[in-house]
Image (spheres, grey):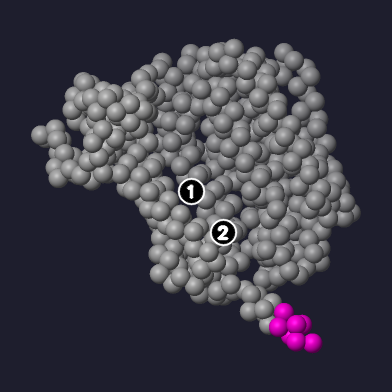
Amino acid sequence: MTELQPPTLAAMEGLFQGQASAPLLILGQPNEQQGKIDNPLQVPGMLSVLTYRRWSAHVRGLDSFPKENWPDNVPLLYYSYHIMVGLGTFFVAIMAISLFLLWRGRLFHTRWMLWILMLAAPFPFIANTAGWMTAELGRQPWLVYGLMRTEKGFSTVVSAGNSLFTLLGFMGLYMVLGILFLFLIWREIEHGPSGVSDSASNLETAGSR
Amino acid sequence: MAALWFWIVAAMVATYVVLDGFDLGAGAIYLLAAKTNDERRQVLRAIGPVWDGNEVWLIAAGGTLYFAFPQLYASSFSGFYLPLMMVLWLLMLRAIGIEFRAHVETHLWQNFFDVVFSVSSILLAVFFGAALGNVVRGVPLDATGYFFEPLWTNFKLDSQVGILDWYTVLIGVMALVTLTAHGSYYVALKTGGDLGRRARGFALLCWPLQFFLTFTALVATYFIRPDITANYSRHPIGFAVPIVVVASLAVMLWANPKGKEKLAFVASSLYIAFMLVGAAFALYPMVLPARDHVYDLTIYNTAASSHGLSVGLVWWTFGAVLAIAYFVFVYRMFRGKVQAGEGHY
């Protein structure tokens, strides 16, 4: 990213001003009008380490690029990226703890961990979508990076109304599919695992003879 | 190179229609031929292991089209935008109809998805036929190489053609009858008892329609585009096409009542393949004729560069061999009649 799409990296990380020893932004709201981050929570120098592996490296900020090469929607890109990375870190953390508990043989009896694991089930979908948003928003304003801009790549013969109709059609179909999917998954979960109690009782009867 | 890829794409499209055609045909006769829940499950188990892989040939053909003739891809997918999106939705609905049905054991749920499956299959057959009709009839391409057609205008073939006019609707109906027959032969091949008998009946019912429509469509095509036979006169080998088409129609009629289900199905496949090959033969080297012949899209003005095409040939061969080997394996694994009883569907 740093090498091939530097404006995208700058927008993703919320780096408005290029600087040596650039900080890694954990939390904060990008303020595009004033070109700064509100309420920043930063790790000093970390971005330089992650991108160039040197504390003193200069990372280019959005100010080094002409405005027409910035991604269209910097705040949305920033938030998508941070949601994805934040959730990813959360996944690593709960998996590490779960692995430790499993190794100690205590995972299946640690109710608080089991609750977290169950409630975390929808998060991969969100993280996945946020990741795709990062990729697609980050590539803007290019369709083919560096070669063709999005505004040059659309079908001139297809009217906007036509596109909107098909967009609504797809959204409607996917929404219905999503509801059906949730309904079917709910039924499966309610039904519970099949055959576990049967095989356990079989083992008991076999062992007692 | 471009000519070779023309025939590769034509072959892939023909493979798709022969394969997914029987899934669509099975869907078309589904509500009428399969009357009990058990019979409906049998039809779904007949197409079950193979329908998804068959549909993949459409994607493969589309992808190959994009690779080999990018300008054609750009032009046709923009110009046919709305019907293409509708085809996508119908494909999704067909898949949903097949796969969701078995999950809830109530009449409401199962009948609903039965209708979704059947109606989407029928509409897909009509749409594909209309698409072929559009390609043969020609579209209003302009100097930029793009066009846009509304869904319909006045159903006549004057200066303002729509996607649906009398000719393309005729081809759409012919496609529906052909694929219904094809699906009936497949269901008859894979099932027995009352269901198989009814499927054979449907195939027999379709035959006179198929026969009539084949000749009507040929006459209509000649009427709207007299130069369609030019390639045939120039290369007499093309006359193998009508010979095989007529022969396969005869075999279908003879084999079906005799219970030679496999032969009837093979004849139907040959019929479809050679009708499409015949259309490709007539069109060559045009890929998308224009209403005004100056703006025809041919293989010469739409093909990708020859270096790209040569590299692609290596990878395509590799992929095609894998795909065909896998298909042979799957069809052999699921050969024979569908057994009554337990199954995923």
Q: Quadrant of the N terminus of chain B?
A: top right
Q: Is residue A208 magenta?
A: yes
Chain letter of disc 2? B
| Label number found at residue B89 | 1
Determine whether B48 is above or below B254 in the image.
Answer: below
For label 1, the crowd category at 10 Å Cα-Cα, with few meaning under 14, some 14 to 19 and many 20 or more, is: some
Please identify the dominant SS of the magenta region: helix
Q: Secondary structure at mark 1?
A: helix
Considering depth in this image, is B62 or A199 the residue closer to the camera?
A199
Instruction: Please report the residue visible at 71 percent of the width from the left and 36 percent of the height from the top.
Output: B323
The magenta stretch is: A203-209
Do tag 1 and tag 2 residues touch (Cβ < 8 Å)? no
Instruction: Please report the residue visible at 76 percent of the width from the left and 28 percent of the height from the top.
Output: B241
Residue identifier under label 2: B97
Q: Residue pushed farthest bottom? A: A209
Inter-mark Cα distance, 1 to 2: 12 Å
B43 horizontally vs B292: left or right = right
Q: Secondary structure at mark 2?
A: helix
Q: Position of residue B240 (x, y in %)?
A: 80, 25
Q: Is residue B25 magenta?
A: no
